[in-house]
Amino acid sequence: MNWVVLLVLVGSGGRIKGDPTKGEAIYARCQACHALDYDRTGPHHCGVVGRKAGTVKDFQYSEAMKKSGLTWNVKTLDRFLSAPTEVVPGTAMTYAGVPDPQERADLIAWLAQQKCKEPK
């Protein structure tokens, strides 16, 4: 039997359950710049949940990201992924974001369950 881990985002609209199976498909949008296990144009996402923003070793972050003070958790990822340049003005990530709250919840649920190798 396969068990699916669901994360819950709590916001003003109530509870939204993230489906990691759907999140994997949404992650395809991120792969133009990111990968799980190695840095590309953007930093790797392996271990992103719980990591302090701007701290992947040897990745060249914008000063804005390094000084953001964010730690990536469900709440901060949800906020950032909704509008990256508004949440961290000056970020090098120019992607417009994921406007749909359910898609963000699904994506975050998928990222949170990834077991990754050390980055290359």
Image (cartoon, grey):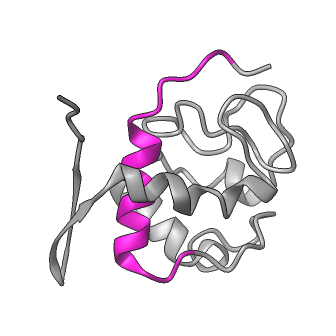
Residue at 37% x, 77% y is 101
Residue 5, position as x, y percentages in the image: 24, 41
The magenta stretch spans residue 75:
no
Which of these two is toward me, 1 or 19? 1
Report the residue that reaches farthest toward the front: 1
Residue 37, position as x, y percentages in the image: 69, 28
Residue 75, image quadrant: bottom left
Residue 119, image quadrant: top right
Instruction: For residue 103, say whether it is visible.
Output: yes
Q: Is residue 101 above or below residue 60?
A: below
The magenta stretch spans residue 113:
yes
Which of these two is toward me, 49 or 87? 49
Q: Quadrant of the N terminus?
A: top left
Residue 28, position as x, y percentages in the image: 65, 58
Report the residue that reaches farthest toward the top: 118
Residue at 73% x, 60% y is 64
Relative side of 106 to 92, left or right? left
Report the residue that reaches farthest toward the left: 14
Q: Quadrant of the C terminus?
A: top right
The total number of labels drawn is 0
Relative side of 14 to 96, left or right? left
Q: Is residue 47 above or below residue 31?
A: above
Which of these two is toward me, 113 or 58? 113
Residue 116, position as x, y percentages in the image: 56, 23
Q: Is residue 56 above or below residue 118?
A: below
User: Which range of residues does the magenta coloring cover?
Assistant: 98-118
Instruction: For residue 73, say whether it is visible.
Output: no
Which of these two is toward me, 8 or 52? 8
Residue at 62% x, 16% y is 117
